[in-house]
Amino acid sequence: MRQTKLASLAESTINVVVGFGISLAAQIYFLPLLGVRVSIAQNVTFALIMTAISICRSYLLRRLFEALHIRRPLSPFMQAVIAERFRQIEREGWSTEHDDGYDRGTLAKAGASYVLHAGTESPAVPHEWPWTREWWKPAGYRRDLVRGVALAIAEGERFDRNRNPTSVPAGLRRPLAAQELRQ
């Protein structure tokens, strides 16, 4: 997900201000414990110097990571899929607990339906669609692909949670099939 320039500026500013405050507070507290006596002006000056060094370090490491491809940017499609997954959870209310109530493959079937029928004009609901007709809402080729992949992610997340039964509330746990245990 991309941040707006304003949000990036706000995050960076808050990070710098908090870092400065922590540095200043630590100096005021710890330097006297170490027997070093300095004035408030000297503490502020040193905290400013350390903040500038921290900003430079952070910038240089970020550029290095970008150059080494350690931080890989997400494509617009991948960003759209992640945004759709969060939309499903936050706006539609399809929580992880809700997803865990489905049998294995249900969310995958729904996702596959969107991917297989992406952008088709047919009013018919695909035979693999696991839910009622009212929930089939195609919206164009790219949008359908995004929805389908987000539903596949929901299925993968559901599977991972059910592989570790302690992460699923007791009332929603179901025994894993033998084939699921082998995976």
Image: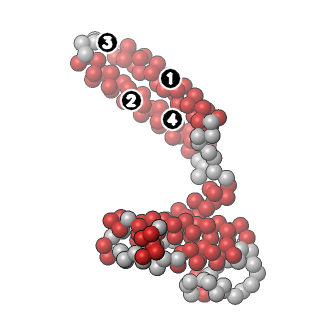
Residues at marks 1 and 4 touching, judged by CB atoms closer than 8 Å: no
Q: Identify the residue position indicated by label 1 in the image.
A: 52
Please, is residue 54 above or below residue 70 in the view?
above
Q: Residue furthest right?
A: 121
Query: Which numbered circle lies on residue 21?
Result: 2
Res 62 → quadrant: top right
Secondary structure of the residue carrying numbered label 4: helix
Res 114 → quadrant: bottom right
Asked whether, in this view, residue 166 is left or right of residue 17, the answer is left
Q: Identify the residue position indicated by label 4 in the image.
A: 13
**Sequence order check: which comes first, mark 1 or mark 2?**
2
Coordinates of residue 96 in the picture (x, y in percent): 44, 68
Query: Which numbered circle lies on residue 134?
Result: none
Secondary structure of the residue carrying numbered label 3: loop
**Residue 96 visible in image:** no
**Sequence order check: which comes first, mark 3 or mark 2?**
2
**Sequence order check: which comes first, mark 1 or mark 4?**
4
Question: In the rendered structure, which amino acid carries the disc numbered 4?
Answer: Thr
Secondary structure of the residue carrying numbered label 2: helix
Asked whether, in this view, residue 42 is left or right of residue 62, the answer is left
Q: Separation of disc 4 and disc 2 at Cα?
A: 12 Å
**Sequence order check: which comes first, mark 3 or mark 1?**
3
Query: Which numbered circle lies on residue 38?
Result: 3
Q: Residue at x 66, y 85 (%)?
A: 126
Q: Mark 1 or mark 4: which is in front?
A: 1
Question: In the rendered structure, which amino acid carries the disc numbered 2?
Answer: Gly
